[in-house]
Image (cartoon, grey):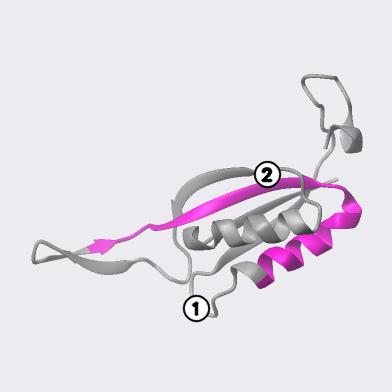
Amino acid sequence: MKLIIAAIKPFKLEEVREALTSIGVRGMMVTEIKGFGSQSGHTEIYRGAEYAVNFVPKVKLEIVVADGLADQVVDTIQKTAKTDKIGDGKIFVLDVAQAVRVRTGELNDDAL
């Protein structure tokens, strides 16, 4: 099993969710986050005063899938979340040692 962690632009969330659902992803965890990378924040003007926004809002997706589906999930996220502008996000893929469905006690792939 693989844990896929993706940080994407918030307005792309629904489009990415629909694309992942269409390829068979049955669940994900979503968290609103703030961060910076190459973008290094930006400046905004509020009530006539300019101020720096050092952290940019993003959405973090956490998805656990069977090994065979991981590459397709990464490809789908990358293609769907892409805007060709700086700050589109990052995707990380990690190995998962074990998964347990709390309600039934099912393990690993059965728990997904």
Horizontal side of 35 relative to 80 (left or right) equals left
What element does badge 2 sit on?
A: loop
What element does badge 1 sit on?
A: loop
Taking the magenta stretch, the answer to whether it contains residue 71 is: yes
Horizontal side of 14 relative to 26 (left or right) equals left
| Location of the N terminus (image quadrant) | top right
Mark 1 surroundings: few (<14), some (14-19) or many (≥20) residues within 10 A: few
Relative vertical location of residue 93 with respect to residue 90 in this rendering, above or below? above
Name the foreground residue: 74 vs 51: 74
Residue depicted at x 49% and y 78%: 85
Residue depicted at x 59% and y 73%: 82
Taking the magenta stretch, the answer to whether it contains residue 74 is: yes
| Segment colored magenta | 52-79
Name the foreground residue: 84 vs 103: 103
Q: Which residue does the numbered mark 1 point to in the structure image? A: 85
Q: Position of residue 27 (x, y in %)?
A: 72, 43
Q: Position of residue 88 (x, y in %)?
A: 54, 69
Q: Amino acid at mark 1?
A: Lys
C-alpha span from label 1 to label 2: 25 Å
Residue depicted at x 62% and y 50%: 61
Relative vertical location of residue 44 with respect to residue 26 in this rendering, above or below? below
Q: Position of residue 83 (x, y in %)?
A: 54, 76
The answer to whether the residues at label 1 and label 2 have Cβ atoms under 8 Å apart is no
| Location of the C terminus (image quadrant) | top right
Q: Amino acid at mark 2?
A: Met
The mark that comes first in sequence, 1 or 2, is: 2
Q: Which residue does the numbered mark 2 point to in the structure image? A: 28
Q: Position of residue 99 (x, y in %)?
A: 82, 32
Give the quadrant of residue 47: bottom left
Residue depicted at x 64% and y 69%: 80
Horizontal side of 64 relative to 61 (left or right) equals right
Mark 2 surroundings: few (<14), some (14-19) or many (≥20) residues within 10 A: some
